[in-house]
Image (spheres, coloured by chain):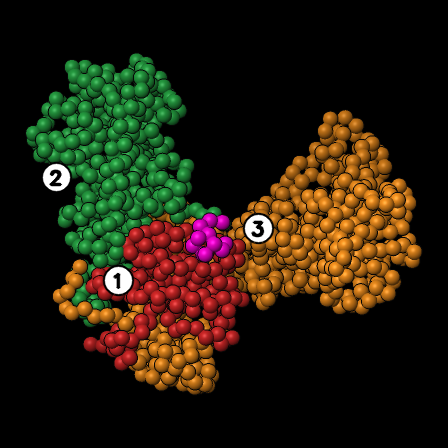
Chain colours: A red, B green, C orange
């Protein structure tokens, strides 16, 4: 049977003592932060490779389940990033996202998931530099925090 | 402060007095039926019954410390939609009233179509404990003793459910009418208090003798609440300590078998079909094997922690702490402890209190343009 | 049946392959579940690249396609079309970005390749869950609604009407023309505002394709792109437009006088009034708040004297529903009321004027017949013009109003021209912004006319004098920031270049039309650069200063842009509606209505019969506010549903290095 993922020679089993490379999932809106990420790329702004973008149309469609799933499924941290307040392409999706993130911030840290592992930012379409800086800061912060507990646990 | 009347108790039997009160309600031309707990045969506890004929009121027992299900969901079925039924008077515990108010916000029931009557609640025994209590203390004398303690201590060696021991909502001022037990000599009389215009209207029509508030109920209540809050703090502290990391949480939930009884028993888990029962969570065999290979071992069934965390996200802001989740768990997972602890935090975060006010919008259904600046590092 | 996925990894010349081992990524992809073929190629977007996909779909029976290349914002459509040409539904395609998000930003080639593999794994996992979707085509009603009859609305209406499409032009006031009719000259050419605006206004009146509705506002808008229904409320004018000849006798006979809004309070008007004889329509209007008959039921002087029996006190408010395909908003701007900036003394000192008031002082039909006179009837010997009043000011508006520098220069010139060279004029400015065609030249010309420019925002205007010379004057106190020293300038008259700001009811209008406002209150365009006239709501376009401060040429150009956008939809006659909108599964929906409140587009209705919420797909924008909340998952955004996102997460997290535990330990 084929595996979902073929075993990666270099990745699946890091060598003992190898530096911890966090996996960070970012739910970003198509109109602002995804565009900012494109701009950061076009402007060749070097970023740590740990952040993987999941393109959403709006942060307002980020179901709290997605964040929980990511954090239980091996992501060391989750970034949710959308348009600045007042700039939402869909009028106010980002405000709804903020409440949902707030809710999770009240729940997950109580179970030892460090609140620094869940980040909400506003990065506008023109802020390529801000996007790159956010990615680099966040990755550095999570590297320092170390791997998330759930990685060890055979729970899902 | 609304008007107060007295429900006379004859022959030292408050249950009979409440049956009589229900008969008075039924006699009112506006009331079509009364929803109230009724004793099941064989000491098995009480379940809600919808009584339309006064002669069927004989087994009605709103005071039985049995709480087999939260009747709020039942009441939504009787009130939802429009005006095609008629007014149902519902005798409820305060947690049932608050759950019903939450469900009304979610368009599941209607406050228009019911007269809510809430009884002071000393608490109830768990479903497993109640038959033991009733076997030893099924008579009126024992009930009066139980009411006299306001649920404190042990009764036939048994304590009331932990959800009740830690409940700070022992009275239901959100209802149209409240029946006061605390601080009263329940062998002689109970208080009836009107809290809303509808309640006031019925109070006048029921023709009960007026009473005055001598402060005894408030005083008894205050003492009880102090104990309950202390118990609650202790429970929060214990639960928080036990679940302070993911290992702790997974141990806490380790007996969960994904039966979803907790969500079926939860009055505010109102979905027709839980998302965890949909095909979104139907994994393919190779997925399980792939997960197991990655982690070395995989707990089966999967998705238990995911389920509980998601349920916390979905309903903790609406949780009224009734404890039916724990009552329904076949494997003794302390679900109530976990949910009540988190609910206290999430409700506080949104300055919300489940069931407090029908006009208060559920936190996730609204937003403000400027709020929670701490989430984005102080930036709007 | 398992899907058969084709994965295509682009080199983008060396843009990707220079950092990412594209071949290695393709080899990795070939080992992923359900992948039937994985290839790499120099330029996937080229014709041979696309043909490769098409050929594989046809020959290998692919049912899903993944392309790993540049940002989907660039080429998603390209590859979707290629899939379609190959006979595959375009939504069975997923694109992942390994250029902007990977090869261009990850320095280390090993890390970049690993990240590319992860991203491909996410896309492959996700595409398994993709479903066929079909765009809908809806007819576009050929008529257009233009809201606001200022110069922008006039331009938009004329452009559209002349193409043969019918326009409903709705104006709140009694006449079209807007602020421009209040101006005297226009910068930098100094042609008179009336001379250039009046022919446009008349053209509107004479254009058979324009249905002009004055005294009217849109109060409710329903529908979606191509099919809007707007409810127009028309307030009574109390004069029958068909009968009135515009002779003006009613205004002569009316006994009641009140301050004129059009004259910015500098003159009076009658209760029955009109802005100017060139008004379009030129029928006067009776102001119900000041008309003696309408307030007290007595008088009727106008009615008795009207030779054409046009006065009708019985007129009532009326409503009309118009059907249109597109809407152009040209609702204009308000002028900031400088009373709140008490340091400038507006309202306290009679000789402090707003810019618009000064326009009226210069206008030949204004209160002074076009002479620049003080309240005492004398011409001022000296005038101070304060720029940026309420603009570029953190406490008022941070933005620049874009017109003040130029109209201040115009005032400089007019003062010199009308009062004489001896008149002294002082400009207090922050920066001179003369960016338009002929503007810098005009600046130079005015400088040469002997006007004084002082760089610095005045701290106050006061009548507290320090010397006999200052007696009877207004003193402008400022710091000359170029010289770095305080200055006191005594003048006879002060003109405040007050900021342009969003209409006070802009938020109400935004709500009615379902569009947004920027932080400055002006309506928000779809994109600040590439979509300056469209809005996030399909079929609704912006024209002129309702989008932000503009001078007349910019407002007119913007309006023509808005008209063009509306016309391109109207002329095509149909619009393709994206299928990536929400859907609520009626078997799962419990009818809690939370989504109804969360939807910013009123696109969700409650079906009373079935007790479930239903999406109006034509109004849904696919933002997922409903799906993000719906606890049962009944509400889902197509192409962004839970299964798809979960699958993507699975893929993205698969090669997260997990520290293995010996079997049997920690089984919880």
Q: Where is residue A90 drawn, in percent x and y? A: 49, 57
Q: Residue at x 35, y 57 (%)?
A: A115
Q: Where is residue C493 drawn, in percent x and y? A: 83, 48
**Residue under pointer 2:** B128
C17 shown above or below B135:
below
Q: Is residue C460 visible?
A: yes
B114 shown above or below C632:
above
Labels 3 and 2 touching (C-beta < 8 A)? no
Q: Residue at x 38, y 26 (%)?
A: B196
Taking depth in this image into account, of B270 and C426 the one nearest to the observer is C426
Q: Where is residue B43 drawn, in percent x and y? A: 10, 32
**Residue under pointer 3:** C510
Q: Which quadrant of the view contains residue C196?
A: bottom right
Q: Which residues are magenta?
A: B370-380
C553 shown above or below C360:
below
In this view, the mark in front (3 or 2)? 2
> Which mark is on residue B81?
none
Taking depth in this image into account, of B337 and A3 the one nearest to the observer is B337
Labels 1 and 2 touching (C-beta < 8 A)? no
Query: Looking at the rendering, in which quadrant would you find the C terminus of chain C?
Result: bottom left
Q: Which quadrant of the view contains residue C135?
A: bottom left
**Residue under pointer 1:** A150
Please rate how many residues cluster around mark 3, counting C-alpha atoms within 10 Å: few if below 14, some from 14 to 19, many from 20: some
Query: Looking at the rendering, in which quadrant would you find the N terminus of chain C?
Result: bottom left
Letter of the chain that mark 2 sits on in the rendering: B
In this view, the mark in front (1 or 2)? 1
The residue positioned farthest toward the left in the image shown: B136
Letter of the chain that mark 1 sits on in the rendering: A
């Amino acid at each position: 049977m084929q595996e979902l993922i073929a075993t990666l020679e270099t990745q699946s089993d890091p060598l003992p003592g190898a530096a911890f490379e966090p996996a960070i999932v970012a739910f970003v809106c198509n109109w602002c932060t995804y565009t900012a990420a494109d701009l950061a790329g076009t402007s060749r702004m070097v970023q740590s490779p740990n952040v993987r973008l999941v393109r959403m149309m709006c942060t307002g469609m980020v179901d709290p389940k997605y964040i929980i799933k990511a954090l239980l499924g091996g992501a060391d941290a989750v970034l949710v990033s959308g348009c600045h307040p007042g700039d939402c392409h869909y009028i106010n999706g980002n405000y709804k996202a903020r409440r949902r993130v707030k809710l999770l911030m009240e729940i997950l840290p109580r179970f030892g998931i460090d609140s620094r592992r869940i980040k909400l930012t506003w990065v506008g379409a023109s802020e390529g530099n801000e996007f790159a800086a956010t990615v680099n800061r966040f990755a550095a912060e999570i590297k320092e925090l170390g791997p998330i507990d759930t990685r060890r646990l055979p729970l899902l | 402060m609304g008007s107060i009347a007295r429900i006379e108790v004859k022959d030292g039997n408050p249950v009979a007095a409440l049956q009589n009160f229900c008969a008075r309600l039924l006699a009112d031309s506006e009331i079509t039926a009364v929803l109230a707990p009724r004793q099941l045969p064989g000491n098995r506890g009480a379940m809600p019954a919808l009584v339309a004929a006064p002669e069927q009121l004989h087994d009605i027992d709103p005071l039985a410390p049995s709480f087999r299900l939260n009747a709020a969901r039942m009441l939504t079925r009787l009130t939802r939609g429009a005006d095609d039924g008629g007014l149902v008077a519902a005798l409820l515990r305060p947690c049932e009233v608050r759950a019903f108010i939450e469900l009304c916000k979610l368009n599941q029931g209607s406050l228009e179509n019911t007269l809510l009557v809430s009884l002071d609640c000393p608490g109830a025994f768990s479903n497993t404990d109640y038959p033991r209590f009733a076997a030893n203390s099924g008579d009126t004398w024992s009930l009066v003793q139980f009411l006299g303690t306001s649920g404190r201590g042990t009764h036939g060696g048994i304590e009331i459910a932990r959800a009740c021991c830690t409940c700070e909502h022992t009275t239901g001022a959100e209802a149209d009418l409240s029946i006061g037990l605390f601080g009263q000599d329940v062998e002689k009389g109970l208080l009836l208090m009107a809290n809303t215009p509808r309640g006031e209207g019925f109070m006048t029509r029921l023709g009960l003798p007026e009473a005055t508030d001598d402060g005894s109920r408030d005083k008894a209540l205050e003492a009880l609440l102090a104990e309950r809050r202390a118990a609650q703090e202790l429970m929060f502290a214990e639960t928080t300590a036990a679940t302070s990391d993911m290992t702790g949480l997974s141990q806490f939930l380790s007996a969960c078998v994904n039966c979803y009884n907790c969500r079926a028993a939860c009055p505010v888990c109102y979905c027709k079909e839980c998302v965890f029962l949909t095909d979104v969570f139907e994994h393919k065999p190779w997925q399980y094997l792939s997960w197991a290979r990655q982690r070395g071992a995989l707990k089966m069934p999967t998705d238990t922690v995911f389920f509980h965390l998601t349920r916390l996200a979905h309903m903790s802001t609406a949780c009224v702490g009734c404890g039916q989740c724990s009552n329904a768990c076949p494997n003794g997972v302390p679900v109530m402890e976990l949910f009540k602890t988190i609910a206290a935090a999430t409700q506080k975060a949104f300055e919300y209190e489940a069931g407090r006010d029908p006009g208060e919008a559920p936190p996730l259904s609204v937003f403000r343009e400027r709020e929670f600046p701490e989430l984005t590092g102080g930036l709007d | 049946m398992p899907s058969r996925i084709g994965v295509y990894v682009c080199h983008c010349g060396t843009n990707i392959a220079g950092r990412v081992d594209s071949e290695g990524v393709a080899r990795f992809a070939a080992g992923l579940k359900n992948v039937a073929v994985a290839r790499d190629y120099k330029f996937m977007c080229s014709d041979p690249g696309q043909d490769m996909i098409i050929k594989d779909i046809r020959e290998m029976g692919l049912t899903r396609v993944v392309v790993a290349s540049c940002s989907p914002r660039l080429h998603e459509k390209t590859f979707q079309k290629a899939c379609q040409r190959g006979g595959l539904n375009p939504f069975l395609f997923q694109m992942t970005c390994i250029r902007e998000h990977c090869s261009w930003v990850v320095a280390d080639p090993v890390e970049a390749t690993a990240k590319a593999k992860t991203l491909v794994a996410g896309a492959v996992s996700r595409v398994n869950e993709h479903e066929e979707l079909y765009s809908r085509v809806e007819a576009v009603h050929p008529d257009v609604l233009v809201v606001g009859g200022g110069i922008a609305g006039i331009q938009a209406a004329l452009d559209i009407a002349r193409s043969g499409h019918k326009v409903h032009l709705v104006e709140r006031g009694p006449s079209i023309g807007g602020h421009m009719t209040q101006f005297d000259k226009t910068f930098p050419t100094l042609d008179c505002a009336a001379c250039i605006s009046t022919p446009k206004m008349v053209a509107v009146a004479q254009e058979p394709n324009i249905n002009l509705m004055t005294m009217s506002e849109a109060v409710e808008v329903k529908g979606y792109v191509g099919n809007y229904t707007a409810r127009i409320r028309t307030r009574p004018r109390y004069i029958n437009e068909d009968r009135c000849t515009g002779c003006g006798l009613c205004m002569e006979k009316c006994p009641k006088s009140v301050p004129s809004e059009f004259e910015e309070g500098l003159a009076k008007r009658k209760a029955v009034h009109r802005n100017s004889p060139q008004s379009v329509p030129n029928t006067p209007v009776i102001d119900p708040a000041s008309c003696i008959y309408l307030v007290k039921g007595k008088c009727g002087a106008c009615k008795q004297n009207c030779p054409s029996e046009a006065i009708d006190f019985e007129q009532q408010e009326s409503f009309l529903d118009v059907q249109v395909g597109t809407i152009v908003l040209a609702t204009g701007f308000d002028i900031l009321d400088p009373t709140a900036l008490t340091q400038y003394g507006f309202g306290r000192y009679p000789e402090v004027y707003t810019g618009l008031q000064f326009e009226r002082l210069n206008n030949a039909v204004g209160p002074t017949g076009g002479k620049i006179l003080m309240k005492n009837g004398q011409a001022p010997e000296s005038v101070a013009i304060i720029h940026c009043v309420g603009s570029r000011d953190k406490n008022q508006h941070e933005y620049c109003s874009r017109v003040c520098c130029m109209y201040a220069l115009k005032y400089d010139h007019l003062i010199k021209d009308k009062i004489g060279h001896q008149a002294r004029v002082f400009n207090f400015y922050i920066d001179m912004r003369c960016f338009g065609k002929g503007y810098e030249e005009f600046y130079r010309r005015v400088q040469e006319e002997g006007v004084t420019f002082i760089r610095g925002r005045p701290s106050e205007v006061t009548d507290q004098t320090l010397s006999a010379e200052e007696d009877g004057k207004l003193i402008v106190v400022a710091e000359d920031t170029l010289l770095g020293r305080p200055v006191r300038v005594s003048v006879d008259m002060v003109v405040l270049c007050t900021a342009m700001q969003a209409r006070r009811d802009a938020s109400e209008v935004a709500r009615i039309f379902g569009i947004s406002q920027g932080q400055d209150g002006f309506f928000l365009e779809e994109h600040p650069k590439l979509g300056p006239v469209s809005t996030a709501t399909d079929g609704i376009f912006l024209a002129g200063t309702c989008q932000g401060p503009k001078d007349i040429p910019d407002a007119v150009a913007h309006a023509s842009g808005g008209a063009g956008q509306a016309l391109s939809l109207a002329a095509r006659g149909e619009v393709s509606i994206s299928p990536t909108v929400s859907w609520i599964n009626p078997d799962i929906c419990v009818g809690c209505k939370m989504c109804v409140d969360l939807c910013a587009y009123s696109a969700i209705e409650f079906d009373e019969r079935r007790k479930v919420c239903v999406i109006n797909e034509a109004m849904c924008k696919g933002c997922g506010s409903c799906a993000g909340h719906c606890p049962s998952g009944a509400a889902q955004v197509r192409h962004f549903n839970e299964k798809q996102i979960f699958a993507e997460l699975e893929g993205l997290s698969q090669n997260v290095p997990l520290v293995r535990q010996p079997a049997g330990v920690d089984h919880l």
